[in-house]
Amino acid sequence: MSNIVVFGGDSHPDLVHKICDNLDIKPSEVHLGKFSNGETSISINESVREKDVYVIQSGCGQVNDAFMQLLILISACKSASASRVTAVMPYFCYSRQPDIPYTAKGAPVIHRPQQDGNGTKLTTRRPGADSSFKSLNSAIRSTINLENPQPDRGIAPPDLTSSKSLSRIPMIPGSKLQNSHTNGDAEDLFNAQNAGYKLWVVQAGTLIANLLTEAGADHVITMDLHDRQYPGFFDIPVDNLYCKPLAQNYIQHNIPNYQDAVIVSPDAGGAKRATAIADALELSFALIHKERRSQLLKGPPDATLTSGGTLPVSDRPLVSQPTNSVIRLSSSSSSISSITSTESRFVQTTMLVGDVRNKVCIVVDDLVDTSYTICRAARLLKEQGATKVYALITHGLFSGDALERISSSEIDQLIVSNTVPQQETVKHLGSDRVDIIDVSRVFGESIRRIHNGESISMLFEHGY
Amino acid sequence: MNGDSEEMTSNNIKLLAGNSHPELAELISKRLSIPLSKVGVYQYSNKETSVTIGESIRDEDVYIIQTGFGEQEINDFLMELLILIHACKTASARRITAIVPNFPYARQDKKDKSRAPITAKLVANLLQTAGCENVVTMDLHASQIQGFFRIPVNNLYAEPSVLHYIRTKTDLDNAILVSPDAGGAKRVAYLADKLDLNFALIHKERQKANEVSKMVLVGDVTNKTCLIVDDMADTCGTLVKACDTLLEHGAKEVIAIVTHGIFSGSAKEKLKNSKLARIVCTNTVPVELDLPIIDQIDISPTLAEAIRRLHNGESISYLFTHAPSE
């Protein structure tokens, strides 16, 4: 392979080497580091003039650092006269765009200063605390304190509302990260108080696409993008590879009696992805549906626990009792209690559609981050009589305390691809419980084909 | 804003702040008597940045305050800024101005060796791509960085505030200004003219980034109070060596005055063990060092006044030579 240069960022060196092994080339020499003030520093030690450059960087770990490093690498190659620069992002950061602060996908919002344990380096910085502004600061602080209980950095100095109960966006109920005053639902509370304006969360997808293009990327290769519309955000070609052929291959070769297994989608959003695998392998399919209903609209809790729907369903109760949780919206604030007291109860219902009794279940999802959804799904499946639960995941981010949760969950076998480093996962769960699907061959082959100007559509169907 | 017709088209200042420097944002907000807008900038547990907007900014004049600093978080803060700008753009703001007192990556402004990235140019492009229409910054490391943008850049100077500080807080009778390197000579010469003081220059031979080897002093500093003036103090290697050089040449005491007090890496140790009588910096970045010799100049009045003038379409150039009164 002539004229090709492959650089790896520092997010996933292992995958870079594997991809390069598959291409039978060596990763090109690049020095990656940081200046003492924290700015990313790179230096490229090989000529890239008129070369076809591939920069491999997964969006994991310190995401923003990794992304900036990718942008700087692309920009450096481009300004060093590379003929074409392709960004290879096995996991595409910011690809999931939650549209509500309280996301049904289960990504709890955390605040930097309050993260204990592993996040020590992000803990409270006290800028200016020792300066001559000290007295001034405390004066300002005390005035803020009247309306904002914690005017600290990360609590977002301009607070979301002026209500005491609302200094932060709540997390998933039951989260260990949860703090005492977080059991409200910021969105509902906020919208109740600000009738004219709805709280919204910025969707960064277009921005990320534009930033990559602006840095000089001519082409993007990624895998299992969460939104299928995502490539439309770009003005450059995006090759979205699929993990599906590899997943099918795994099921066929590693799951005994897979013909009797059931493919399960842990939420409605992933149904299409899961049915595709079920169809290809001619397996039956089940769906877990999670909904939150306002009790006021739906009546008392028991009334909401009906199955409903015309889909073929099992004769067993469709709702698992332990996953019902009645969430009471912040009772800590007296000022808003009048608004919320009558309509503040929500019922979270998890339903299983399909029969899994005495079956082996394979839960398929593209992205597992906090693992709430998939662990909840596994528990529900076991309660409904599943004999064994496999979790088949493309991007295993496992942020926060996800690994602990999985380790104590009903998931018997975790199968995850190496688009994101999985050393920690293996260490935590033991190599018996985790199987890694290697995606480096698919990425290597796609790079080879793109470099040679061949079609890559064969990779979508058959893998490599 | 009298009358209905004007209210319909009212176009107000909206102040937004990221997480990099809440104190500065508060000071600016207080100075302008405009509360900070309700936005939430958070980090998901997977380390992605999430921005929540809690009030309408449609057709408003938006100013986003975010400085570039943080040994761990500088890229997080940059992404916060980009996402905030993008958010305002998608929320139909009339004009978006980024207030970046310390411009990140300002020192990576040239291709000093083969294939070196010009990251300052990249950052300029990223800001514009996100939707920024105006930039306010302070004491850019190289004023040519303004040329990296296709949008207006207002490069403010800390010099008026520094002058005010020198006049009020130091003994001018026996003072001399010192530039720690040839690059800063112009800045120091300007201050020396204004204060009617002499100035000396230290020439350094730099072999590697963040490392200084040899220093040569030009000028007489015997029994004088030396005021070293520079645009930034990062690892403080230069400052400490310059201080030692000056004291070796008979200086009475050495005071350092810098705009951006980044103080990264081993700066704290170096400053603790140094013979500097005082080190003065502005609050373009938060200072986290707990050292008695550190003193700060508040430049928030300058930034606040710049915002007011930009909003009203008045000239900024007054601020190049005058510091708004406290």
Image: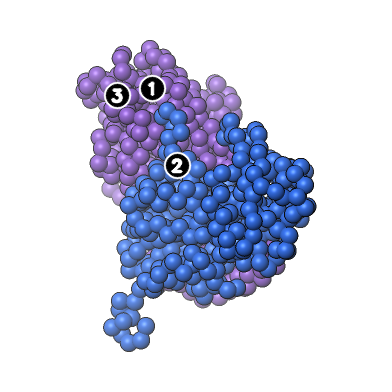
Q: CA distance from mark 1 to mark 2?
A: 21 Å
Dots 1 and 2: beta carbons under 8 Å?
A: no
Depth check: give the residue in front, A146 or A433.
Answer: A146
The quarter in which the N terminus of chain A is drawn is top left
Depth check: give the residue in front, A34 or A204.
Answer: A34
The residue that label 2 is drawn on is: B109
Question: At 56% from the left edge and 41% from the top edge, which residue is drawn?
Answer: A38
Q: Secondary structure at mark 3?
A: loop
Dots 3 and 2: beta carbons under 8 Å?
A: no
For disc 1, the neighbor class at 10 Å (few under 14, some 14 to 19, many from 20) is some
The residue that label 3 is drawn on is: A50
For disc 2, the neighbor class at 10 Å (few under 14, some 14 to 19, many from 20) is some
Question: At 39% from the left edge and 28% from the top edge, which residue is drawn?
Answer: A55
- Are the residues under marks 3 and 2 on the same chain? no
The quarter in which the C terminus of chain A is drawn is top left
Instruction: Give the letter of the purple chain.
Output: A
The answer to whether residue B27 is seen in the rendering is yes
Amino acid type at circle 1 is Ser
Instruction: Answer left or right for A134 relative to A374.
Output: right
Instruction: Answer left or right for A224 relative to A163.
Output: left
**Picture colour for chain B:** blue
* Chain label for disc 3: A
- Are the residues under marks 3 and 1 on the same chain? yes
The image position of residue A281, as x and y in percent, is: 30, 25
The numbered mark at residue A272 is none
The residue that label 1 is drawn on is: A47
The answer to whether residue B44 is seen in the rendering is no
For disc 3, the neighbor class at 10 Å (few under 14, some 14 to 19, many from 20) is some
* Chain label for disc 1: A
